[in-house]
């Protein structure tokens, strides 16, 4: 399974998102600190989930980081995150 | 991680001694990462004075700040001892005007004419 697939799986399970987009931006960071020859180091993740409602920005991102802890430790270097509740 | 991590004392001291404290990769003049550069750009654009620490110079600090903030990535911005967030959050708060509000509330001087481009 690719890291993108693993992240999609974990975010789907953990957040039951109304919308989930994962884009691999690794090419844009090629050769830069944290890049890896096989890519899959930098992603943009856009999530719309009811679970974010009532949470501040930091809490929302911590929730995502918590779910993707293993991926962040193993390979993923940085995530650009957009976290919204439905209707926001 | 427990509170006995010796780096935590240094971080606590830095974030309380400096109203605006940025943990980043590289220096404000030579950022070593696009995300760090983006936060420096926002702060500079707003005319905010800030202190920065380069985590690439110090692996203990690099791991320590992640544990201290319970936040896995760099950059990290602190205002008045409180963790504000990383690059996405800082940028978004600048766009919405919330960052200016925060600086105002915390008594941090900044150029109030500075608007998102």
Image: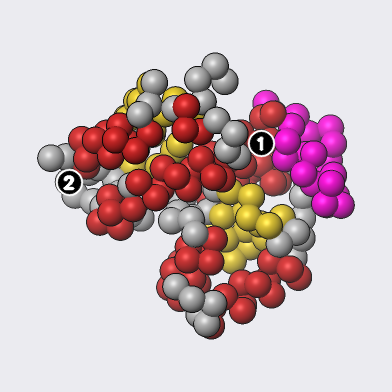
> Is residue B74 rendered magenta in the image?
no
* Residue sitting nearer the eye, B94 or A35: B94
User: Which residue is drawn at the image coordinates 19% and 49% (left, top)?
Assistant: A37
Measured from the top left, where is residue B42 in percent x and y?
Answer: 66, 41
Colour style of the rendered protein structure: secondary structure
Mark drawn on residue B93: 1
Residue at 77 percent of width and 55 percent of height = B49
Image coordinates of residue B102 in percent, x first then y, are 77, 44
Where residue A28 sits: x, y (%)? 34, 37
* Vertical relation: A37 (above or below) A43: below
Q: Is residue A35 in view? A: no
Q: Is residue B90 visible?
A: yes
Query: Is residue B58 or residue B86 the one in the foreground?
Result: B86
Residue at image coords 45%, 44%: A63
Q: Is residue B73 above or below residue B6?
A: above
- Asked if residue B102 lies in the magenta stretch, the reply is yes
Estimate the x, y position of residue A45 in percent, counting from the top left: 38, 33
Q: According to the image, label 2 marks what residue?
A: A38
Magenta span: B97-117
**Which circle marks residue A85 in the picture?**
none
Are marks 1 and 2 in one subunit?
no
Q: Is residue A14 above or below residue A66?
A: above
Which subunit holds the residue at mark 2? A
Q: Main secondary structure of the magenta part?
A: loop
Location of the C terminus of chain B (image quadrant): top right
Q: Indicate the secondary structure of the residue bearing disc 1.
A: helix
The reply to whether discs 1 and 2 touch (Cβ–Cβ < 8 Å) is no
Left or right of residue A32, residue A9 in this image: left
């Amino acid at each position: 399974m690719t890291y993108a697939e693993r992240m999609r799986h974990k975010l789907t399970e953990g957040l039951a998102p109304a919308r989930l987009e994962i884009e691999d931006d690794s090419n844009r960071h090629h050769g830069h600190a944290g890049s890896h020859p096989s890519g899959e180091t930098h992603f943009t993740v856009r999530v719309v989930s009811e679970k974010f409602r009532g949470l501040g920005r930091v809490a929302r991102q911590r929730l995502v980081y918590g779910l993707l802890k293993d991926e962040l430790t193993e390979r993923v270097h940085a995530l650009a995150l957009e976290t919204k509740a439905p209707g926001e | 991680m427990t509170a006995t991590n010796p780096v935590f004392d240094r971080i606590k001291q830095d974030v309380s001694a400096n109203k605006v404290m940025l943990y980043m990769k590289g220096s404000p003049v030579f950022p070593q990462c696009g995300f760090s550069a983006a936060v420096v750009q926002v702060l500079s654009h707003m005319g905010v004075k800030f202190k920065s620490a380069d985590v690439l110079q110090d692996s203990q600090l690099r791991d320590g700040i992640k544990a201290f903030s319970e936040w896995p990535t760099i950059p990290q911005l602190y205002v008045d001892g409180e963790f504000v967030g990383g690059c996405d959050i800082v940028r978004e708060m600048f766009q919405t005007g919330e960052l200016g509000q925060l600086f105002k509330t915390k008594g941090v001087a900044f150029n109030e004419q500075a608007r998102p481009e």
